[in-house]
Image (tube, rainbow, N blue to C red):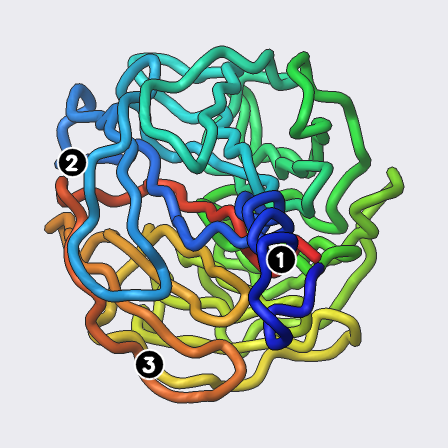
Amino acid sequence: MPNYQGVWDITTQFQYAAEWPRLSTRSLFFGGETSTQISDRSNVIEYIDITSTGNAADFGDLSSGKRSLMSASSSTRAVAAGGISTSLLDVMEYVTIASTGNATDFGDLTLAVYQGTGTGNSTRGLFQLGQSANAIINTIDYISIASTGNSQDFGDLTVARAYGEDSAVSSPTRGVFAGGYGASGSVNTIDYVTIGSTGNASDFGDLDTARYGFGGASSSTRGVFGGGNTSGDTMDYITIASTGNATDFGNLTASKRYVGGTSNGTRGVFGGGKISSTVQNVIEYITIANTGNGTDFGDLTVARSSLTATSGSHGGIA
């Protein structure tokens, strides 16, 4: 990357322009559930400038209204996958982060699923599939974000689980999957994989509180998990390059579950969610390198829970 602290000449300007997608400050929110009615699935895509504060703006639409979907992104492209509309979906679709407009077909997952979670780095997206029509599963799929096509099998988690919703985090080399709902209830397990390879996940440690339905945000070194079905204002964090149990970070502004979480590598944001049976439109933010409580950022255009969020400059992008 150019050193922008030097002389601002015309060459540097062109270099900066070439780097712009990599310096994206946008975070996107996809889909979600707008009420407890099965037909109330949102197709809305909206965006914020994560470096500022303020309300989200309309970006475009998904191909259908859906909730409990998952997402992954590079510096230029975001991919939304799976979820449930009137039935389970295997559809993946994508948008170009720097523009606005409706999503375009990308390909299909290996299974029709919902309640999974996605993460990745600048080249590869990973999707932990969550729940199929028949069972909670431990399958991880992967895609090459710059291309289109169907996903491929990556490996398996150590524990099958669903309701990951938006909880995975990453560094440029490592993807981390935390919590969820398994065969015996809420899970505190944290697993990790090396994004550039394939193979089964390894145990990382445990969450501070076993829970599901929370969001994740990360820098290149630290992952923060916020919200969930129990102690729903909880945030805890890990150092991604190491292993070990999560540590208390602070609290969200309210106790909520099914939030969407993402980051720009410096600031994490958590949007939407559900308090009791009421869907929320609140977006709040943290500074990932610090610890402390969430601060109000602004509002989504549509209140919803079980949405997914991603960014063009998250912790997995070097």
Please identify, in this view, whether the residue under mark 1 or under mark 2 is nearer the observer: 1
Any part of residue 286 in sight = yes
Residue sitting at x 63%, y 54%: 177
Count of marks, rendered view: 3
Q: Tell me if residue 276 comes above or below residue 20 in the rendering.
A: below
Residue located beneath label 1 in the image? 12
**Mark 3 touches mark 1? (CB < 8 Å):** no
Q: Position of residue 144 (x, y in %)?
A: 72, 28
Looking at the image, which residue is at 43% across and 32% down? 69
Q: Dot 3: few (<14), some (14–19), or many (≥20) neighbours within 10 Å?
A: many
- Earlier residue among tags 3 and 1: 1
Q: Which residue is mark 3?
A: 251
Q: Which residue is mark 2?
A: 34
Mark 1: amino acid? Thr
Cα–Cα span, label 3 and label 2 = 24 Å
Label 3, label 1: how far apart the Cα atoms are: 41 Å
Q: Find residue 238 and report its horizontal and vertical position in percent.
A: 63, 76
SS at badge 3: strand
